[in-house]
Amino acid sequence: MALGNIDYITLGVFIALFAIFTILGFWASRWRRGDLSKIDEWGLGGRRLGWLLVWFLMGADLFTAYTFIAVPSGVLASGSLYFFAVPYVAWGFGVALLTMPRLWTVSRNKGYVTASDFVKERFNNRTLAIAVALTGVVAELPYIALQIVGMQAVLAAMLAGLTGVVSKTVSDIALLIAFIILASFTFTSGLRGAAVTGVFKDILIWITVIAVIVIVPLSYGGFATAFHNAALNSANVNHALNNAKGSILYSYLSPKLIPAYFSLSLGSALALYLYPHAINGSLSSEDKGKLKLGTSLLPLYGIGLALLALFGVLIYAVPNALKAVISLGAGTFVVPSLIAYTMPDWFVGLAFLAIFIGGLVPAAIMAIGVANLLVRNVIKEFRTLQPKTEATLAKITSTVFKFVALGFVFVVPATYAIQLQLLGGILITQTLPSVFLALYTKRLNGWATFAGWASGIALSLALVYEANAKFGVIKTSLYSTPLGPIYISLIALAVNVVIAVVGSIIAYGIGWRPSEKIKEDEIVKEM
């Protein structure tokens, strides 16, 4: 089927802008030159990013290809529950302001590159540090895979518009070429490449969001028309996309879903800055003040995300775009279809490229974060590595991990990748006591905290197993309780914290005393 205003001008703009993206990625190795044979220069940009680049870099982690695809798709298919992404982002940056400056300070003072470096010395416990590192690696794989799912949606929409059909072979080849280019400039430029291309990507993203949210309502009757049409047609959309009956609630939230909404927002906010890529981006800041400034401005991206979520309702104002989504049979086509049917062909190329590299840039940052963890906190625990060898091994690991994620998407259906990411978010939250709480107290015992982590992981898996009909298909991350459906990560985290605290009290009672390897002023005072 044809898809809106997609033609060869669209393709030409897409390719031309991708060429600029590629040039910027390779050029970045020369920007603020450093010795890229050192892991902190390659993996943290030499810790020399100013507030504006921190803002862009962390924004690149938020406005991803998957965000562009999943949030509006979720709103269209499930209604107002998916607006939990808006408070989650706002709260997440509040969590970041409470934790990242302290982690940045101790990392600068002690030479840490990862959160697990801090955990190892804070608790004097290698096993806990390895557990935290491996949790980050496992949680990050489906997260990268989801960026690829978002990129696939853009390629599929473009192919549908150009040829009338969607060729998976052509789409896979295009993805493979893009990842080869990404792996090449990430290997040579490291985090500098992600930061510079992140600026380019975010500029295009903001142009896309602002243009669509202004032009489409003015041209198609505004949100009044969209909500009116949604009230009339949401039952048909629900049946087409979910094979379910009944209307979808867009204008308000069902009271029974309020616990789910609140717990999803809070749990996701707590998880956001535990992911390796978010910590990695924060530690790249030039100083603590610039990190605070860049982070304090990130709620501007929350405004963009709120507007983006509204695309899931706005599509009702454009009947042809909505028909295309239903014909293609997937909510992932909400944003591509809306753009294709409302914007000129050249702008469609710009917007599609923005979403496409919106997957590539976060994938680079995530792979760098994973490589740092695997090399410094797993491999290096079992064999001695010279600084140059450590950096080289991190570069190789980053490259391999990108293609593992790409292969993961080729082998595992997109639906399962999305579901596994839900589980990844639940798991990464179980590292909160060992990272966030440890920034504020040294009185947690390492083995008690490890027991809390293990219990949280085990309970998470058990509750996901129970909530999803014995792992038939993972459809939900919520668990039914007397209070209503609650995000599983919060339930498991509560048990995790109780075990860590009670275990620490018992350990203190039988003679254990906190490690003194990290002094208080090394966490709060920049040396």
Image (tube, rainbow, N blue to C red):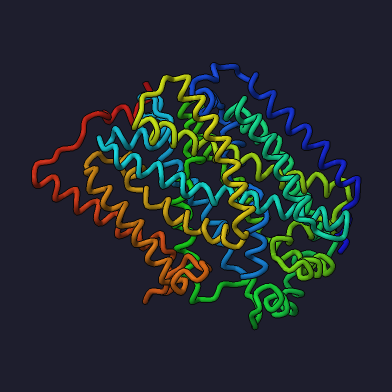
Residue 297, can we see it?
no
Position of residue 138 relative to residue 18, above or below, is: below
Q: Nearer the viewer, residue 376 or 245?
A: 376
Q: Residue at x 54, y 76 (%)?
A: 254
Position of residue 480 relative to residue 498, above or below, is: below
Residue 505, can we see it?
yes
Outermost residue toward the bottom?
Answer: 245
Q: Residue at x 58, y 46 (%)?
A: 405
Q: In the rendered picture of this protein, how many numbered marks are placed on residues?
A: 0
Quarter of the image with the C terminus in it: top left
> Looking at the picture, how far across and down is residue 377, in whole percent?
38, 34
Quarter of the image with the N terminus in it: bottom right
Position of residue 275 relative to residue 40, above or below, is: below
Q: Residue at x 8, y 46 (%)?
A: 510
User: Could you tell whether 493 is left or right of 299 in the image?
Assistant: left
User: Could you tell whether 59 is left or right of 343 in the image?
Assistant: left
Outermost residue toward the right?
Answer: 8
The image quadrant that residue 9 belongs to is top right
Q: Residue at x 61, y 45 (%)?
A: 300
> Looking at the picture, how far across and down is residue 143, in whole percent?
55, 50
Q: Nearer the viewer, residue 400 or 203?
A: 400
The image quadrant that residue 367 belongs to is top right
> Looking at the picture, how far across and down is residue 461, in whole percent?
39, 62
